[in-house]
Image: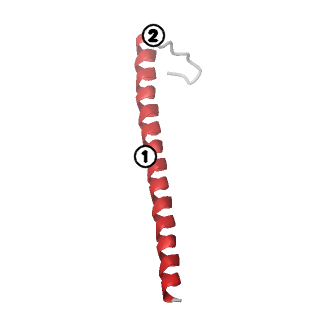
Amino acid sequence: MPSDTIVSLSSETIKKFEASLQIIKNRFYKLQWDLDLKEKRLEKILRDSESQEDYIDYLKK
């Protein structure tokens, strides 16, 4: 098929593609949400760790 040939897609094919694309988007958003949640947890762990280090330093004085 020459590269300048226009292919007409059926509406059924387009609907399937759009449904697949929506599934991919939903998975991406879920992964992004999970990543954000893990980042917040790591930030809290880091803050808690720094607080504990500060407290230990305080006790050593």
Mark 2 Cα shell of 10 Å, populated few (<14), some (14-19), many (≥20): few
Q: Is residue 45 above or below residue 20?
A: below
Nearer to the camera, 26 or 15: 26
Q: Classify mark 1: residues with Cα within 10 Å, few (<14), some (14-19) or many (20+).
A: few
Mark 2 vs mark 1: in front: 1
Q: Residue at x 55, y 16 (%)?
A: 6
Q: Residue at 48%, 84% (x, y): give it.
A: 59
- Mark earlier in primary sequence (2, 1): 2
Q: Which residue carries the number 2 mark?
A: 11
Residue 61 versus residue 28 in the image, above or below: below
Rendered image quadrant of residue 10: top left
**In the image, farthest residue toward the bottom:** 61
Picture residue at 46% right of the left edge, 32% below the top: 25
Q: Secondary structure at mark 1?
A: helix
x and y percent of residue 57 in the render?
Answer: 52, 83
Residue 53: x and y, percent? Answer: 49, 77
Find residue 22 and report its horizontal and vertical position in percent: 44, 26
Q: CA distance from mark 2 to mark 1?
A: 34 Å
Which of 8 and 38 lies nearest the eye of the viewer? Answer: 38
Q: How is the image coloured?
A: secondary structure
Numbered label attached to residue 34: 1
Q: Nearer the viewer, residue 29 or 7?
A: 29
Decide: is 30 above or below 14: below
Image point 51% across, 15% down: which residue? 7
Identify the amino acid type marked 2. Answer: Ser
Is mark 2 in CB contact (under 8 Å) with mark 1?
no
Q: x and y percent of residue 32 in the render?
A: 48, 43
